[in-house]
Image: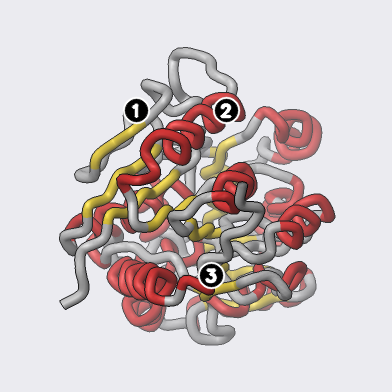
């Protein structure tokens, strides 16, 4: 029997673990942390102080920064958290797993205890590629094979898909008559395309999404003028219960993203409810959605229109079965646990460098 590990999980401080509303990374960290605790590992979660966990919780802030009542600098509080872990507590762990991405790299590179980094964001930005290549020796996890493309040459240890417990989502065989846009109202996610498609096909569209401060101008100038239409219902940002109700009763998720989506939790959430996904062919979409079975992969406006009109041909049961086969949290935890042991068994995977 393999020994139980002492594991540090590092989450962003912006949202609670799990998030109260919007927040993908923190949701993944929650199910991974809880799964590792259930297996008997000693897990310490570095996250905001209002996080909910059965692990030991360490935090430099009392509440998540975005929804908390007290303003904090995300960068400074994150540096404080990393300093506490790597400078004062590092001997308490066998392995460190960071979900912060870039800020962890200088600490990880000098530490005797190995650090694994899961990259949750897009990697096709020049500065991101430059720093990843500088720290190319660190072991990284990609959340889709497509995510790796801009920096395929760094030390990718594994691709591990996100997962949820099967009980998190209600399967629904008989949806309502509307389509759903769910996520964030930003230019690269193309909510304006979803609205135009709904109007062109004369189908109801519910929009459940948050507006970040950086996207406020885009929302006010581009999206808001499009919302005054009888087919369009702007719901706003929703919590988990509202999200599940919207997903399970939708005819399909209309996911008009136009960027290299690293994963897209909303797509597997939709499948878990039995709701097929209509999505643009970019990023991880072709890995997650089986065209003509669990949704439609589209390249043109005409493809989207055909998909909307053909959605009733797809089996909602097949969508749920695909979720249970490929995207359960048990599989995610298995993959990470196995990778931890592999890194500890083979110190060449550790990638320590720049030692004093």
* Picture coordinates of residue 267, whole percent (x, y): 50, 65
Query: Mark 2 or mark 3: which comes first in sequence?
Result: 2
**Left or right of 235, for residue 355:** right
Q: Quadrant of residue 18?
A: top left
Tags 1 and 3 in contact by the CB under 8 Å rule? no
In the picture as drawn, the residue positioned furthest to the bottom comes out as 292
Q: Quadrant of residue 331?
A: bottom left
Task: Check disc 2: other Cα within 10 Å, few if <14, some if 14-19, many if 20+.
Answer: some
Q: Is residue 101 above or below residue 59?
A: below
Q: Which residue is mark 3?
A: 277
> Toward the viewer: 311 or 60?
60
* Picture coordinates of residue 312, whole percent (x, y): 48, 78
**Residue sitting at x 57%, y 79%:** 287
Query: Mark 1 or mark 2: which comes first in sequence?
Result: 1
* Picture coordinates of residue 95, whole percent (x, y): 38, 57
Q: CA distance from mark 2 to mark 3?
A: 34 Å
Q: Nearer the viewer, mark 1 or mark 3?
A: 1
Q: Is residue 240 above or below residue 251?
A: above
Tags 1 and 2 in contact by the CB under 8 Å rule? no
> Toward the viewer: 208 or 307?
208
> Toward the viewer: 32 or 166?
32
Q: Secondary structure at mark 1?
A: loop
Task: Check disc 3: other Cα within 10 Å, few if <14, some if 14-19, many if 20+.
Answer: many
**Label for residue 68?**
none
Q: Which residue is mark 2?
A: 74
**Residue sitting at x 75%, y 46%:** 187
* Picture coordinates of residue 280, whole percent (x, y): 69, 69
Q: Which residue is mark 1?
A: 49
């Amino acid at each position: 029997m393999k020994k139980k590990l002492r594991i540090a999980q590092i989450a962003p401080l912006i949202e609670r673990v799990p998030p109260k509303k919007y927040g993908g990374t923190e949701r993944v960290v929650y199910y991974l942390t809880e799964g590792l605790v259930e297996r008997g590992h000693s897990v310490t979660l570095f996250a905001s102080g209002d996080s909910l966990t059965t692990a030991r919780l360490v935090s430099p802030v009392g509440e998540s920064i975005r929804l908390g009542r007290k303003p904090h600098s995300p960068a400074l509080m994150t540096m404080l958290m990393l300093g506490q872990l790597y400078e004062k507590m590092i001997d308490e762990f066998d392995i460190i797993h960071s979900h912060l991405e870039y800020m962890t790299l200088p600490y990880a590179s000098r530490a005797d205890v190995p650090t694994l980094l899961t990259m949750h964001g897009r990697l096709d930005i020049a500065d991101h590629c430059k720093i990843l290549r500088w720290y190319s020796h660190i072991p990284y996890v990609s959340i889709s094979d497509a995510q790796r493309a801009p920096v395929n040459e760094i030390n990718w240890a594994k691709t591990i898909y996100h997962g949820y417990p099967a009980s998190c989502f209600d399967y629904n065989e008989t949806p309502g008559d509307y389509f759903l846009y769910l996520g964030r109202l930003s230019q690269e996610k193309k909510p304006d395309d979803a609205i135009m498609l709904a109007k062109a096909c004369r189908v109801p569209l519910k929009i459940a999404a948050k507006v970040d401060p950086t996207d406020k101008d885009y929302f006010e100038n581009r999206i808001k003028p499009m919302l005054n239409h009888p087919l369009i219902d702007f719901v706003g940002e929703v919590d988990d219960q509202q999200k599940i109700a919207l997903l399970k009763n939708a005819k399909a998720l209309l996911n008009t993203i136009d960027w290299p989506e690293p994963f897209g939790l909303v797509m597997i959430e939709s499948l878990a409810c039995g709701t097929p996904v209509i999505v643009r062919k970019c990023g991880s979409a072709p890995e997650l959605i089986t065209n003509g079975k669990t949704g439609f992969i589209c390249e043109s406006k005409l493809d989207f229109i055909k998909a909307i009109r053909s959605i009733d041909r797809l089996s909602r049961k097949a969508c749920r079965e695909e979720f249970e086969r490929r995207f359960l949290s048990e599989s995610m935890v298995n993959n990470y646990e196995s990778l931890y042991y592999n890194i500890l068994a083979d110190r060449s995977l550790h990638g320590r460098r720049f030692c004093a």
